[in-house]
Image (cartoon, grey):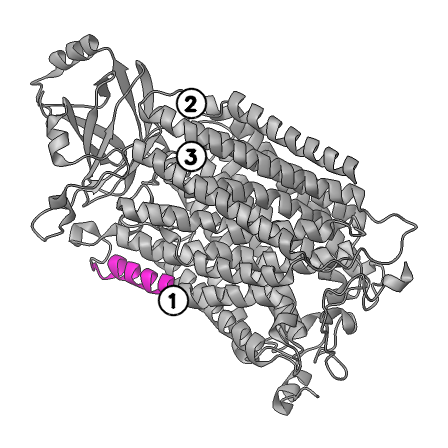
Amino acid sequence: MLNKNIYLILLISLVFAISFWIGTNVNLLPAEASINAPIYDELFKILFIIGLIIFIGMTMAVIYSLFKFRKRNDQIGDGIALEGNLSLEIIWTIIPSIIVLLIGLYSYNIYDRMGGMKELNHNHEMISSNSKKIWAGISQTSDNEISKNNLSIEVSAMQFAFLFNYPKGKFISGELHVPVDQKVSMKMESKDVIHAFWVPEFRIKQDIIPGQPTVLNFTPTKVGKYPIICAELCGPYHGGMRASIIVEEESDYNDWFNKNKKTEVNL
Amino acid sequence: MTISIDPQKTNNKSLQPKGWLRYFSFSLDHKVIGIQYLVCGFLFYLIGGTLASAIRIELASPMSDFMPRDVYNQVLTLHGTIMIFLWIVPVVNGAFGNYLIPFYVGARDMAFPRLNAVAFWLIPPSGLMLVASYFVEGAAQAGWTAYPPLSITTPQSGQIIWILSVLLLGGSSIFGGINFIATIIKLRRPGLKLMQLPMYCWAMLGTSLLVVLSTPVLAGTLILLSFDIIANTGFFNPVLGGNVVVYQHLFWFYSHPAVYIMVLPAFGLVSEILPVHARKPLFGYTTMVFSIMGIVVLGLVVWAHHMFTSGTPPWMRLFFTIATAFIAVPTGIKFFNWVATLWGGKISINSAMLFSCGFIINFVFGGITGVALAQVPFDIHVHDTYFVVAHFHYIVYGGTVFIIFSSIYHWFPKVTGKMLNEKFGILHFIITFIGFNLCFAPQHWLGLNGMPRRVAEYDPQFQFINQISSIGALLMAISTIPFLINIFLSVRNGKDAGDNPWNALTPEWLTSSPPPVENWEEEAPLVEEPYGYGKQFSEQK
């Protein structure tokens, strides 16, 4: 009996160790290129490790049962008439409940740190026939915060393109240029059907819904060129609805901005 | 106590065609209707599977080169709709529910046999109409979710036929749901208590409650959508002041419970299969019943987790995160109980058992990614990507379809009186299990790294993983061959099964194989312990 328990403890420890090792050493995600990305990746690692422990444990239990308790040719009759075990059932109800609750609270904390739980500006919560409600994406801020930001961009999504309007420079671009380490506020509107704005390296996505302007904020942290992908089925060329976000040093961004500003582009 | 038989009904049944012709008749026999559901569903599975193969052929290369982009969207719309509304829902509910529930409650038929037949006979014409909608000008191409404004602004004749077809299929589900609830509650054999019912009855009771509560919402939503398309109303059309997010709320109020409408019956079926082939009682019967009801209640209040990237306020995201994640608790209880049912058994390694164990492994994987998807920050990154495609298929194919196959291997001897060939069955399992995991496991990585779903073309960096996925899909298609050969050969030349080849204790095995028209020649048996393994046969050890 003692030996069996030791083997069980060793086995469980091994499952935990393997899961921790895989969870911390195997990277399944693209590069981290925004303030949100490392915060998101913390949650991903925790979920990955817990998921591995459960999956490996359950799979081993099933496969072990199939081998250990398989019916041999010379065997007749049934297995043990065990219909339940109250304490065991209470344990495997309470432990998953605690795990789920802790994951939920932790993910709430992550979401809060990513800016998802900020309250909307009060005025925008009031729906009236005369004023458009502004919907909040992750990292939303109030109007006041938006106005303080150095970089405000208006995004228009349409079948099958994103257009980026730089109000301060009075020009529109097909590419999104932003300076590194600077907060960007985007007000997004759709001209036709539902689209979605997704930058995998930033770990942000927000649907762009016709009739409902949406605010999305992010802070890029790594210079480079990243894809902007429409993630919501928007028509035949949905797969081709892509653009690029170019994160560059402030001086390079200023050069690009100055080169393009005051250029009038008519839609 | 004898079971009362409606003489009118009995007379009608005696006039029904005999032999294989009865499967093409408006039969009132619940067993015939069950097989009609199964065969009809399987034919649509072959159509939906062919469309899935076309999708995977297209995705074997990054460019849209196998079919035009709009055709690709039409194909994926048809694939999703067929697989959900014409294969999984009718089969796990209609086919096995019809065949088994009257046996399990000790009745000679369903509570409303004519309504039962009507529910089935709505399916073939609706299905044919759905398939035909592909060939009219402007086939539906807005996905099985049919989100407006896309479903309103794309070519409309096909979309209208699509809506009508889904409405009729929803009607069929509602008729079936009402019938199952009435049969389980009102037709139970005297002396048979609720807590003595086989677990599949509880699963079907829970499922039917979900069907009756949520399907009318989908029906109403689709009717409003059709008004927007045909009559230019503005319920969901933002140009006319409509709100597309309201459509999403209404749609997902049905379509999230639809996942449980697909998996709860599978949970019930696996609960019947495991104890028989493990020769052990179902572990934790009472907690299994409560967990089903827990899933029903929670299943109705989690729909908005499909809308975390839509315009949902923060408090709503928090509530739906916690509610969704908590479904893992009753679901987890069931999985622990199934593993405990295997533990210490005398397990027969056969096709039915292998598919059931494959189901447990696949579903645990899908359940874990489901808990992850319940978390708002996680969901925001992977929503509408191949991660969700993979998760969903782990639940509905790795879960439900595996159990459909397991159930066919388990109940085929009862239905036909013949045994299926085990070698073909095990080959079927191995190819399906490898093909399925090869197809869908890599798609998690695709979603995490930037491949959205529903795209005919993608970033070339994802080509290799997509090719692996397509090879997996090819294996899944090939796996159907040994299954079909097995069915045809066994029906013609299979070994005689006898009445109870598995020595099972549930009531359907206590009558002849195939069962007579009224299920039992005499009085229905009262089975107080459908899982009493280890007691009855313990003296044989």
Q: Nearer the viewer, residue B434 or B366?
A: B366
Residue where numbered disc 1 is placed: B216
Q: Are marks 2 and 3 in contact (CB under 8 Å)?
A: no
Q: Position of residue B105 (x, y in %)?
A: 64, 75
Disc 1: host chain: B
**What is the three-letter code of the residue carrying label 1?**
Pro
Image location (x, y in percent) of residue A98 = 49, 45
Point out the image quarter for the N terminus of chain A: top right
Label 2: which residue?
A30
Q: CA distance from mark 2 to mark 3?
A: 22 Å
Tell me the residue at 63%/47% (across/down).
B360
Three-letter residue code for mark 3: Ala
Residues marked 3 and 1 touching at CB (< 8 Å): no
State if disc 2 and disc 1 touch (CB < 8 Å).
no
User: Quick one: label 3 or label 1, which is nearer the N terminus?
Assistant: 1
Q: Residue at x 57, y 47 (%)?
A: B397
